[in-house]
Image (cartoon, rainbow, N blue to C red):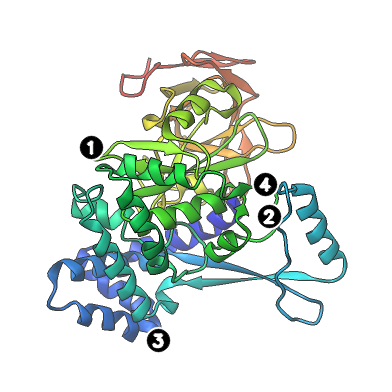
Amino acid sequence: MKRHIIYLFGVVLLLLPACTTHVDSLEWALRQAGKNRAELEKVLQHYESDSLKLAAATFLIRKMPYHIGFCDTLFTPDGISYMPDITYPGHNEAQIKHVFDSLFDCGYYIRRTKERDVEVMTSDFLIDNIECAFEVWNTPWAGKLDFDAFCRYILPYRASNEPLCSWRRKMLRKYLPMVRSFQVGTPVDACMALNDSLKGSFHFVGMLPVYPSIEMVDRYRQSNCEGLALYFIFLLRSVGIPVAIDCTTWAKSEDGHSWCSVMDNKGGWHGFAANEMSCEEHRKMFSEKRKLIPPKVYRRLFAPEPVSMDMQDDGYRTYVKNPLFKDVTDSYYVPPVNIMLDLQRKLYSSDEGLVYLCASSINQHRVLGVGTRRGDRCFIKNVVGDNTFVLAESPDGKTLHFLTDTFYVDKSGVMKGPDIKGCANGTVGEKNG
Protein backbone atom coordinates (compact mmCIF):
# COMPACT_ATOMS: atom_id res chain seq x y z
CA MET A 1 0.00 0.00 0.00
CA LYS A 2 2.77 2.43 0.92
CA ARG A 3 4.41 2.03 -2.52
CA HIS A 4 1.15 3.09 -4.16
CA ILE A 5 0.88 6.10 -1.87
CA ILE A 6 4.48 7.17 -2.48
CA TYR A 7 3.94 6.97 -6.26
CA LEU A 8 0.84 9.13 -5.94
CA PHE A 9 2.71 11.53 -3.65
CA GLY A 10 5.23 12.21 -6.40
CA VAL A 11 2.48 12.98 -8.89
CA VAL A 12 0.65 15.27 -6.46
CA LEU A 13 3.78 17.27 -5.62
CA LEU A 14 4.40 17.84 -9.33
CA LEU A 15 0.86 19.09 -9.79
CA LEU A 16 0.38 21.27 -6.72
CA PRO A 17 2.44 24.30 -7.84
CA ALA A 18 0.28 24.68 -10.94
CA CYS A 19 -2.84 25.45 -8.91
CA THR A 20 -3.03 28.93 -7.35
CA THR A 21 -6.47 30.56 -7.55
CA HIS A 22 -9.95 29.13 -7.84
CA VAL A 23 -10.38 30.39 -11.40
CA ASP A 24 -6.94 29.20 -12.44
CA SER A 25 -7.40 25.82 -10.76
CA LEU A 26 -10.49 24.96 -12.82
CA GLU A 27 -8.86 25.91 -16.10
CA TRP A 28 -5.69 24.11 -15.01
CA ALA A 29 -7.69 20.94 -14.27
CA LEU A 30 -9.41 21.13 -17.65
CA ARG A 31 -6.03 21.45 -19.33
CA GLN A 32 -4.79 18.41 -17.41
CA ALA A 33 -7.67 16.43 -18.95
CA GLY A 34 -6.16 16.79 -22.41
CA LYS A 35 -8.37 15.00 -24.92
CA ASN A 36 -10.92 14.33 -22.17
CA ARG A 37 -11.58 18.04 -21.57
CA ALA A 38 -14.84 17.97 -23.53
CA GLU A 39 -16.30 15.34 -21.16
CA LEU A 40 -15.68 17.54 -18.14
CA GLU A 41 -17.00 20.64 -19.86
CA LYS A 42 -20.24 18.75 -20.58
CA VAL A 43 -20.74 18.42 -16.82
CA LEU A 44 -20.21 22.15 -16.25
CA GLN A 45 -22.63 22.97 -19.08
CA HIS A 46 -25.18 20.49 -17.71
CA TYR A 47 -25.33 22.42 -14.41
CA GLU A 48 -25.20 25.97 -15.78
CA SER A 49 -28.67 26.73 -14.39
CA ASP A 50 -28.07 25.10 -10.97
CA SER A 51 -25.49 27.10 -9.04
CA LEU A 52 -25.12 24.64 -6.15
CA LYS A 53 -24.63 21.56 -8.30
CA LEU A 54 -22.33 23.57 -10.55
CA ALA A 55 -20.23 24.40 -7.48
CA ALA A 56 -20.13 20.70 -6.57
CA ALA A 57 -19.09 19.73 -10.09
CA THR A 58 -16.41 22.42 -10.07
CA PHE A 59 -15.10 21.13 -6.74
CA LEU A 60 -14.71 17.60 -8.09
CA ILE A 61 -13.08 18.69 -11.34
CA ARG A 62 -10.60 20.98 -9.58
CA LYS A 63 -9.41 18.12 -7.37
CA MET A 64 -9.58 15.44 -10.06
CA PRO A 65 -5.98 15.79 -11.37
CA TYR A 66 -4.64 14.65 -7.98
CA HIS A 67 -6.34 11.26 -8.17
CA ILE A 68 -5.18 8.03 -9.77
CA GLY A 69 -6.82 4.61 -9.87
CA PHE A 70 -4.86 1.36 -9.75
CA CYS A 71 -6.28 -1.63 -11.57
CA ASP A 72 -4.64 -5.03 -11.05
CA THR A 73 -5.60 -7.81 -13.47
CA LEU A 74 -4.48 -11.43 -13.20
CA PHE A 75 -3.55 -13.01 -16.55
CA THR A 76 -2.95 -16.58 -17.64
CA PRO A 77 0.41 -17.40 -19.30
CA ASP A 78 -1.41 -16.92 -22.63
CA GLY A 79 -2.45 -13.38 -21.71
CA ILE A 80 -6.11 -14.10 -20.92
CA SER A 81 -7.59 -12.33 -17.90
CA TYR A 82 -8.52 -14.69 -15.10
CA MET A 83 -10.39 -14.29 -11.83
CA PRO A 84 -9.65 -17.09 -9.32
CA ASP A 85 -12.13 -18.27 -6.72
CA ILE A 86 -10.65 -17.21 -3.37
CA THR A 87 -13.75 -17.69 -1.23
CA TYR A 88 -13.28 -20.47 1.29
CA PRO A 89 -15.23 -21.63 4.34
CA GLY A 90 -13.60 -20.04 7.34
CA HIS A 91 -11.85 -17.57 5.01
CA ASN A 92 -8.59 -19.44 5.25
CA GLU A 93 -5.79 -17.03 4.44
CA ALA A 94 -3.30 -19.86 3.91
CA GLN A 95 -5.53 -21.30 1.19
CA ILE A 96 -5.75 -17.95 -0.58
CA LYS A 97 -1.98 -17.63 -0.50
CA HIS A 98 -1.64 -21.17 -1.83
CA VAL A 99 -3.96 -20.39 -4.75
CA PHE A 100 -1.98 -17.36 -5.87
CA ASP A 101 1.41 -18.98 -5.28
CA SER A 102 0.34 -21.96 -7.40
CA LEU A 103 -0.86 -19.67 -10.19
CA PHE A 104 2.36 -17.64 -10.15
CA ASP A 105 4.38 -20.86 -10.28
CA CYS A 106 2.44 -21.82 -13.42
CA GLY A 107 3.25 -18.55 -15.18
CA TYR A 108 0.22 -16.46 -14.26
CA TYR A 109 1.05 -12.82 -13.68
CA ILE A 110 -0.50 -9.56 -12.49
CA ARG A 111 -0.49 -6.50 -14.71
CA ARG A 112 -1.13 -3.11 -13.13
CA THR A 113 -2.56 -0.16 -14.99
CA LYS A 114 -2.73 3.36 -13.62
CA GLU A 115 -5.36 5.80 -14.82
CA ARG A 116 -5.59 9.49 -14.01
CA ASP A 117 -9.20 10.34 -13.21
CA VAL A 118 -9.07 13.59 -15.14
CA GLU A 119 -8.11 11.73 -18.33
CA VAL A 120 -10.76 8.98 -18.18
CA MET A 121 -13.73 10.52 -16.35
CA THR A 122 -16.96 10.54 -18.37
CA SER A 123 -19.69 13.15 -18.08
CA ASP A 124 -22.36 10.50 -17.47
CA PHE A 125 -20.38 9.00 -14.57
CA LEU A 126 -19.75 12.37 -12.90
CA ILE A 127 -23.29 13.68 -13.36
CA ASP A 128 -24.80 10.51 -11.91
CA ASN A 129 -22.40 10.70 -8.96
CA ILE A 130 -23.41 14.31 -8.25
CA GLU A 131 -27.13 13.53 -8.57
CA CYS A 132 -26.82 10.58 -6.17
CA ALA A 133 -24.90 12.68 -3.64
CA PHE A 134 -27.50 15.47 -3.67
CA GLU A 135 -30.31 12.92 -3.37
CA VAL A 136 -29.02 11.81 0.05
CA TRP A 137 -27.92 15.23 1.36
CA ASN A 138 -31.48 15.97 2.52
CA THR A 139 -31.73 12.88 4.72
CA PRO A 140 -32.22 13.43 8.49
CA TRP A 141 -28.66 12.31 9.27
CA ALA A 142 -26.98 14.41 6.55
CA GLY A 143 -29.21 17.47 6.46
CA LYS A 144 -27.10 19.47 8.95
CA LEU A 145 -23.87 19.13 6.97
CA ASP A 146 -22.65 22.36 5.41
CA PHE A 147 -21.67 22.46 1.75
CA ASP A 148 -17.95 22.16 2.43
CA ALA A 149 -18.34 18.99 4.53
CA PHE A 150 -20.76 17.60 1.96
CA CYS A 151 -18.23 18.15 -0.84
CA ARG A 152 -15.35 16.60 1.07
CA TYR A 153 -16.98 13.58 2.68
CA ILE A 154 -20.14 12.63 0.75
CA LEU A 155 -19.71 13.96 -2.79
CA PRO A 156 -16.37 12.28 -3.75
CA TYR A 157 -16.66 9.43 -6.24
CA ARG A 158 -13.69 7.49 -4.84
CA ALA A 159 -12.34 6.57 -1.40
CA SER A 160 -8.69 5.84 -2.15
CA ASN A 161 -6.92 4.55 -5.27
CA GLU A 162 -9.41 1.84 -6.20
CA PRO A 163 -10.56 1.61 -9.84
CA LEU A 164 -13.51 3.89 -10.60
CA CYS A 165 -16.80 2.19 -9.78
CA SER A 166 -20.25 3.12 -11.11
CA TRP A 167 -22.15 1.37 -8.32
CA ARG A 168 -23.12 4.46 -6.32
CA ARG A 169 -26.74 4.47 -7.47
CA LYS A 170 -26.95 0.70 -7.04
CA MET A 171 -25.80 0.99 -3.42
CA LEU A 172 -28.07 3.97 -2.80
CA ARG A 173 -31.13 2.02 -3.91
CA LYS A 174 -30.14 -1.05 -1.92
CA TYR A 175 -29.12 0.54 1.38
CA LEU A 176 -30.92 3.89 1.68
CA PRO A 177 -34.30 2.26 2.54
CA MET A 178 -32.48 0.20 5.16
CA VAL A 179 -30.97 3.27 6.83
CA ARG A 180 -34.32 5.09 6.71
CA SER A 181 -35.91 2.15 8.51
CA PHE A 182 -33.52 2.68 11.43
CA GLN A 183 -35.16 6.08 12.08
CA VAL A 184 -31.88 7.73 13.02
CA GLY A 185 -31.14 11.45 12.99
CA THR A 186 -27.35 11.82 13.16
CA PRO A 187 -24.48 10.68 10.93
CA VAL A 188 -22.91 8.61 13.71
CA ASP A 189 -26.17 6.84 14.57
CA ALA A 190 -26.87 6.13 10.89
CA CYS A 191 -23.33 4.85 10.41
CA MET A 192 -23.38 2.57 13.44
CA ALA A 193 -26.84 1.20 12.63
CA LEU A 194 -25.83 0.27 9.09
CA ASN A 195 -22.43 -1.05 10.18
CA ASP A 196 -24.06 -3.24 12.82
CA SER A 197 -26.62 -4.57 10.35
CA LEU A 198 -23.82 -5.69 8.02
CA LYS A 199 -21.61 -7.14 10.75
CA GLY A 200 -20.29 -10.53 9.70
CA SER A 201 -21.21 -10.06 6.02
CA PHE A 202 -17.59 -9.41 5.05
CA HIS A 203 -14.38 -10.92 6.36
CA PHE A 204 -10.81 -9.79 6.85
CA VAL A 205 -7.93 -11.54 5.08
CA GLY A 206 -4.47 -10.07 5.44
CA MET A 207 -2.95 -11.58 2.31
CA LEU A 208 -4.12 -10.09 -0.98
CA PRO A 209 -1.64 -9.74 -3.88
CA VAL A 210 -3.86 -7.44 -5.93
CA TYR A 211 -5.05 -3.93 -5.15
CA PRO A 212 -8.68 -4.18 -4.01
CA SER A 213 -11.62 -2.86 -6.00
CA ILE A 214 -15.24 -2.29 -5.02
CA GLU A 215 -16.34 -5.12 -7.32
CA MET A 216 -13.73 -7.52 -5.94
CA VAL A 217 -14.69 -6.91 -2.31
CA ASP A 218 -18.36 -7.26 -3.15
CA ARG A 219 -17.80 -10.51 -5.06
CA TYR A 220 -15.59 -12.27 -2.54
CA ARG A 221 -17.07 -10.63 0.57
CA GLN A 222 -13.58 -10.45 2.00
CA SER A 223 -10.47 -8.30 1.68
CA ASN A 224 -7.56 -6.79 3.57
CA CYS A 225 -8.16 -3.84 5.90
CA GLU A 226 -7.71 -1.26 3.14
CA GLY A 227 -10.14 -3.06 0.83
CA LEU A 228 -12.82 -3.33 3.52
CA ALA A 229 -12.34 0.32 4.49
CA LEU A 230 -12.63 1.66 0.94
CA TYR A 231 -15.69 -0.53 0.25
CA PHE A 232 -17.52 0.73 3.33
CA ILE A 233 -16.50 4.34 2.68
CA PHE A 234 -18.01 4.03 -0.79
CA LEU A 235 -21.14 2.37 0.58
CA LEU A 236 -21.66 4.83 3.47
CA ARG A 237 -21.18 7.90 1.30
CA SER A 238 -23.73 6.49 -1.13
CA VAL A 239 -26.41 6.82 1.58
CA GLY A 240 -25.26 10.26 2.80
CA ILE A 241 -22.98 9.42 5.72
CA PRO A 242 -19.83 11.62 5.90
CA VAL A 243 -16.86 9.28 6.26
CA ALA A 244 -13.15 8.99 5.48
CA ILE A 245 -10.34 6.43 5.65
CA ASP A 246 -7.83 6.76 8.50
CA CYS A 247 -4.57 4.82 8.60
CA THR A 248 -1.42 4.24 10.58
CA THR A 249 1.92 2.49 10.35
CA TRP A 250 2.55 0.53 13.52
CA ALA A 251 5.67 1.14 15.60
CA LYS A 252 5.42 -2.23 17.36
CA SER A 253 4.94 -4.51 14.35
CA GLU A 254 5.93 -4.78 10.70
CA ASP A 255 2.79 -3.54 8.99
CA GLY A 256 0.10 -0.87 8.99
CA HIS A 257 -3.66 -0.63 9.25
CA SER A 258 -6.58 1.24 7.66
CA TRP A 259 -10.05 1.81 9.12
CA CYS A 260 -13.09 4.07 8.71
CA SER A 261 -13.98 7.27 10.52
CA VAL A 262 -17.36 9.05 10.62
CA MET A 263 -17.93 12.77 11.19
CA ASP A 264 -20.58 13.92 13.66
CA ASN A 265 -22.74 17.05 13.39
CA LYS A 266 -20.19 19.10 15.37
CA GLY A 267 -17.28 18.23 13.08
CA GLY A 268 -15.79 15.62 15.43
CA TRP A 269 -14.56 12.28 14.09
CA HIS A 270 -15.09 8.76 15.41
CA GLY A 271 -13.10 5.75 14.20
CA PHE A 272 -14.71 2.35 13.71
CA ALA A 273 -13.87 -0.96 12.04
CA ALA A 274 -15.90 -1.64 8.90
CA ASN A 275 -18.31 -4.53 9.34
CA GLU A 276 -16.75 -5.37 12.68
CA MET A 277 -16.39 -2.78 15.44
CA SER A 278 -18.45 0.15 16.72
CA CYS A 279 -16.98 3.57 17.52
CA GLU A 280 -16.86 2.78 21.24
CA GLU A 281 -15.35 -0.66 20.69
CA HIS A 282 -12.77 0.87 18.37
CA ARG A 283 -11.92 3.61 20.87
CA LYS A 284 -11.43 1.08 23.64
CA MET A 285 -9.35 -1.30 21.50
CA PHE A 286 -7.08 1.39 20.06
CA SER A 287 -6.54 3.21 23.34
CA GLU A 288 -6.11 0.29 25.74
CA LYS A 289 -4.49 -2.53 23.77
CA ARG A 290 -0.84 -1.56 23.81
CA LYS A 291 0.10 -3.08 20.46
CA LEU A 292 -2.77 -1.28 18.69
CA ILE A 293 -2.17 2.28 19.93
CA PRO A 294 -1.21 4.16 16.73
CA PRO A 295 1.99 6.25 16.96
CA LYS A 296 0.60 8.54 14.23
CA VAL A 297 -2.77 8.66 12.41
CA TYR A 298 -3.39 10.09 8.95
CA ARG A 299 -6.70 10.76 7.19
CA ARG A 300 -7.11 10.14 3.46
CA LEU A 301 -8.47 13.29 1.80
CA PHE A 302 -10.15 13.91 -1.54
CA ALA A 303 -9.19 17.59 -1.56
CA PRO A 304 -5.43 17.98 -1.04
CA GLU A 305 -4.22 20.36 1.63
CA PRO A 306 -1.31 22.76 1.04
CA VAL A 307 2.04 21.32 2.10
CA SER A 308 3.00 23.20 5.27
CA MET A 309 6.67 22.71 6.03
CA ASP A 310 8.91 25.08 7.97
CA MET A 311 11.68 24.63 5.45
CA GLN A 312 12.31 23.45 1.90
CA ASP A 313 11.50 19.85 1.15
CA ASP A 314 14.52 17.59 0.68
CA GLY A 315 12.82 15.48 -2.01
CA TYR A 316 12.50 12.29 0.00
CA ARG A 317 9.22 10.59 -0.90
CA THR A 318 7.05 9.27 1.87
CA TYR A 319 3.30 9.16 2.28
CA VAL A 320 3.46 11.26 5.47
CA LYS A 321 4.27 14.29 3.26
CA ASN A 322 1.51 13.53 0.77
CA PRO A 323 -0.97 16.48 0.73
CA LEU A 324 -3.80 13.95 0.30
CA PHE A 325 -3.02 12.70 3.83
CA LYS A 326 -3.77 14.83 6.88
CA ASP A 327 -2.13 14.24 10.25
CA VAL A 328 -5.04 13.75 12.69
CA THR A 329 -3.09 12.14 15.54
CA ASP A 330 -4.12 14.87 17.98
CA SER A 331 -7.81 14.07 17.43
CA TYR A 332 -7.45 10.41 18.39
CA TYR A 333 -7.78 8.54 21.65
CA VAL A 334 -4.34 8.87 23.28
CA PRO A 335 -2.99 12.43 23.72
CA PRO A 336 0.19 12.94 21.66
CA VAL A 337 3.28 14.87 22.67
CA ASN A 338 5.61 17.23 20.85
CA ILE A 339 9.20 15.99 20.89
CA MET A 340 12.28 18.20 21.12
CA LEU A 341 15.54 16.28 20.87
CA ASP A 342 19.15 17.49 20.80
CA LEU A 343 21.37 15.39 18.55
CA GLN A 344 24.62 14.06 19.91
CA ARG A 345 25.92 13.07 16.47
CA LYS A 346 26.89 15.46 13.71
CA LEU A 347 25.94 13.39 10.66
CA TYR A 348 24.39 16.15 8.62
CA SER A 349 25.83 18.58 6.09
CA SER A 350 23.65 21.66 6.54
CA ASP A 351 22.45 23.79 9.44
CA GLU A 352 18.79 22.85 9.06
CA GLY A 353 16.55 20.38 7.30
CA LEU A 354 13.77 17.85 7.60
CA VAL A 355 13.99 14.85 9.92
CA TYR A 356 12.01 11.63 9.79
CA LEU A 357 10.56 9.82 12.77
CA CYS A 358 10.90 6.13 12.00
CA ALA A 359 9.68 2.95 13.60
CA SER A 360 12.52 0.94 15.05
CA SER A 361 12.42 -2.69 13.98
CA ILE A 362 14.80 -5.50 13.16
CA ASN A 363 14.00 -5.72 9.46
CA GLN A 364 13.15 -2.17 8.42
CA HIS A 365 12.70 1.41 9.57
CA ARG A 366 9.37 2.70 8.29
CA VAL A 367 8.73 6.44 8.29
CA LEU A 368 5.98 7.48 10.70
CA GLY A 369 6.23 11.25 10.68
CA VAL A 370 8.24 14.23 9.52
CA GLY A 371 9.74 17.04 11.60
CA THR A 372 12.37 19.74 11.37
CA ARG A 373 15.94 20.23 12.52
CA ARG A 374 17.74 23.47 13.30
CA GLY A 375 21.34 22.84 14.15
CA ASP A 376 21.49 20.05 16.71
CA ARG A 377 17.85 20.40 17.76
CA CYS A 378 15.01 18.36 16.21
CA PHE A 379 11.27 18.99 16.56
CA ILE A 380 8.53 16.43 15.84
CA LYS A 381 4.87 17.22 16.56
CA ASN A 382 2.00 14.94 17.52
CA VAL A 383 3.70 11.70 18.54
CA VAL A 384 1.99 9.06 20.68
CA GLY A 385 4.30 7.69 23.37
CA ASP A 386 4.98 4.20 24.68
CA ASN A 387 6.78 3.55 21.42
CA THR A 388 10.36 3.10 20.24
CA PHE A 389 11.71 5.27 17.44
CA VAL A 390 14.81 6.36 15.55
CA LEU A 391 15.43 9.70 13.80
CA ALA A 392 16.80 10.01 10.28
CA GLU A 393 17.43 12.57 7.56
CA SER A 394 17.79 12.26 3.79
CA PRO A 395 20.76 14.28 2.49
CA ASP A 396 20.31 12.97 -1.06
CA GLY A 397 16.50 12.85 -1.12
CA LYS A 398 16.60 9.12 -1.84
CA THR A 399 17.91 7.27 1.20
CA LEU A 400 17.63 7.66 4.96
CA HIS A 401 20.67 8.57 7.04
CA PHE A 402 20.12 7.79 10.72
CA LEU A 403 20.84 10.50 13.25
CA THR A 404 20.18 8.62 16.50
CA ASP A 405 20.23 5.21 18.05
CA THR A 406 16.90 3.68 19.01
CA PHE A 407 15.14 5.65 21.75
CA TYR A 408 11.95 5.14 23.72
CA VAL A 409 9.24 7.72 24.40
CA ASP A 410 6.88 6.92 27.26
CA LYS A 411 3.23 8.00 27.52
CA SER A 412 4.14 11.27 29.24
CA GLY A 413 6.79 12.09 26.66
CA VAL A 414 9.91 11.18 28.65
CA MET A 415 12.62 9.94 26.27
CA LYS A 416 15.15 7.27 27.11
CA GLY A 417 18.06 5.92 25.09
CA PRO A 418 21.81 6.07 24.51
CA ASP A 419 23.01 9.69 24.40
CA ILE A 420 19.44 11.00 24.25
CA LYS A 421 19.06 14.58 25.40
CA GLY A 422 15.61 16.05 24.98
CA CYS A 423 12.09 16.35 26.28
CA ALA A 424 8.46 16.40 25.28
CA ASN A 425 5.76 18.77 26.38
CA GLY A 426 3.14 16.23 27.47
CA THR A 427 0.24 17.58 25.42
CA VAL A 428 0.16 19.31 22.10
CA GLY A 429 -0.39 23.03 22.25
CA GLU A 430 1.89 23.92 25.13
CA LYS A 431 5.29 25.45 24.62
CA ASN A 432 8.16 23.07 24.08
CA GLY A 433 10.06 22.46 27.28
Mark 2, residue position: 208
- The x and y percentages for residue 424 are 44, 17
* Residue 370 visible to the viewer: yes
Q: Earlier in the sequence, mark 1 or mark 2?
A: 2
Q: Is residue 181 above or below residue 47?
A: above
Q: Secondary structure at mark 2?
A: loop
Mark 1, residue position: 266
Q: Secondary structure at mark 3?
A: helix
Q: Which mark is residue 16?
A: none
Q: Nearer the viewer, residue 315 or 284?
A: 284
Q: Earlier in the sequence, mark 4 or mark 3?
A: 3
Which mark lies nearer to you, 2 or 3?
Answer: 2
Q: Nearer the viewer, residue 364 or 111?
A: 111
Query: Dots 2 and 4: beta carbons under 8 Å?
Result: yes
Q: Which mark is residue 206?
A: 4
Label 1, label 2: how far apart the Cα atoms are: 37 Å
- The x and y percentages for residue 5 are 53, 54
Circle 2 residues within 10 Å: few <14, some 14–19, many ≥20 = some
Mark 3, residue position: 35
Circle 4 residues within 10 Å: few <14, some 14–19, many ≥20 = some
Q: Earlier in the sequence, mark 4 or mark 1?
A: 4
Amino acid type indicated by mark 4: Gly
